[in-house]
Image (cartoon, rainbow, N blue to C red):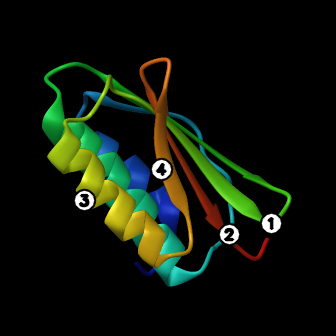
Amino acid sequence: AEEGLAAALEELSEQAPRLVPRALPSGRFPSDVESAAYFATLESLRLTPHDVTVDVVAEQGRLVLLIGAGTPSCSAMLQIQDRVGAAGGTASVCDGQLRVEMPCAW
C-alpha cells in the first residue's frame, strides 16, 4: 500500500514464483484502484495451479490489467467483479484472459 501497485505485484511474484508480471507502469493510482487490481491478480493466482501473467497498462485515464490465468469460476468472477466494480471498473474474460478496467488519474 505504501509503494504502489507495481511494487506490490513484484513483491507478490517473489513470494509466489508462478506470478509473472510482464508490464507494470510506474507511478501511483487511487488506493481503491490499486487494491482492486491487486485483489484480482491475487484471486487469479489463488485459483489456478499454472503460471499467471499480468500486464498493467495505464491509458486514456484507465488502468487496464490483462491477467492470463484461464477462466475464473463463476463465484470467483463475481467476487472480482464486485471488488473492481466498487472502484468504478469492469472485469470480463476474453480468450482465456481476465481483463480488468478501472478509471484512474494518470
Q: In the image, what residue type sits under mark 3? A: Gln
Measure the C-alpha gap from mark 1 to mark 3: 24 Å
Q: In the image, what residue type sits under mark 4? A: Ala
Image quarter in which the C terminus is found: bottom right
Q: Position of residue 22 (x, y in %)?
A: 55, 31
Helix, strand or loop under label 3: helix
Q: In the image, what residue type sits under mark 1? A: Gly
Q: In the image, what residue type sits under mark 2? A: Pro
> Pointers 2 and 1 in contact (CB under 8 A)?
yes
Label 4 Cα crowd, 10 Å radius (few <14 / some 14-19 / many 20+): many
> Pointers 4 and 2 in contact (CB under 8 A)?
no
Residue identified by numbered label 3: 79
* First reached walking from the N terminus: tag 2 or tag 1: 1
- Residue at 56%, 74% (x, y): give it: 88
Label 1 Cα crowd, 10 Å radius (few <14 / some 14-19 / many 20+): few
Residue identified by numbered label 1: 61
* First reached walking from the N terminus: tag 1 or tag 4: 1
Image: 9 above or below 31: above
Image: 100 above or below 4: above
Residue identified by numbered label 4: 91
Image: 106 above or below 100: below
State the residue lying farthest toward the right. Answer: 60
Q: Nearer the viewer, residue 73 or 37?
A: 73
Q: Nearer the viewer, residue 17 or 96?
A: 96
